[in-house]
Amino acid sequence: MSPLITGNICNEVIKQGGLIQSENQLLTSSQKDLLWELFEHIGVVWQNLEYGSSNLKSSWLEMIAAKSNVAPSYTGEYINACYVLHELLDLNGNDSDTYRKLFLTYKPSAGPPSTRLEHMKTYVINEFIYMQVMASGFKHFGGKNYHGYVKGSRYSRQDLVRTYKPKP
């Protein structure tokens, strides 16, 4: 797999530490759509969602609202991610391979994020992955042993985990 091609926006150094600040900016609907596309591709690359990510959209929108409307606001990070993602898609093409490279082969440097791409990977992509896992994204990944976070209801007729059945 060839490396991820990055450009000036991706490699721009952010001098401030911590979250990128946004001066009372709001996310536009096109920015939310682009971020949703990014979130959907997590499930595509890991092949762990039976229905795409459509069953997680309302939870995802709630998370975006919560992280945008309450301090510390991630709005600056989300807007930055949109700029970076536009550049990556322009340079690498808008296909699953670009997202696969971004998620699986691109590794930020050790330490706090310093470039726009590192900020996106740390504050947006990693958060989206956590959200997908917490919202049952791993439910469809294999699917054999999943019965909820606490192994399902104690009244379930289904085994809590797969039982060992020796071959006759």
Image: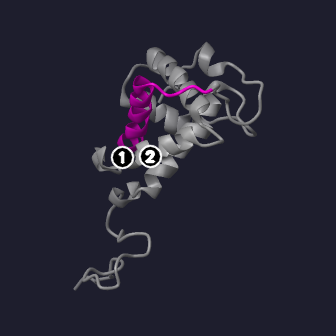
Amino acid on which disc 1 is placed = Ser
Q: CA distance from mark 1 to mark 2?
A: 6 Å
Please, what secondary structure does the residue beneath circle 1 have? helix
Magenta-drawn stretch contains 29: yes
Instruction: Report the front residue among 164 and 114.
Output: 114
Of residue 62 and residue 44, the one placed in the foreground of this image is 62
- Residue kind at label 2, given as amino acid type: Glu
The residue range painted magenta reads: 24-45
x, y percentage for residue 157? 24, 83
Q: Which residue is mark 1?
A: 58
Q: Are marks 1 and 2 in contact (CB under 8 Å)?
A: yes
Q: Quadrant of residue 106?
A: top right
- Residue positioned 68% across, 35% down in the render: 19
Which is the main secondary structure of the residues drawn in magenta? helix
User: Which residue sits at x=50%, y=38%?
Assistant: 103
- Numbered label tally: 2
- Residue at the disc numbered 2: 62
Farthest residue toward the left? 168
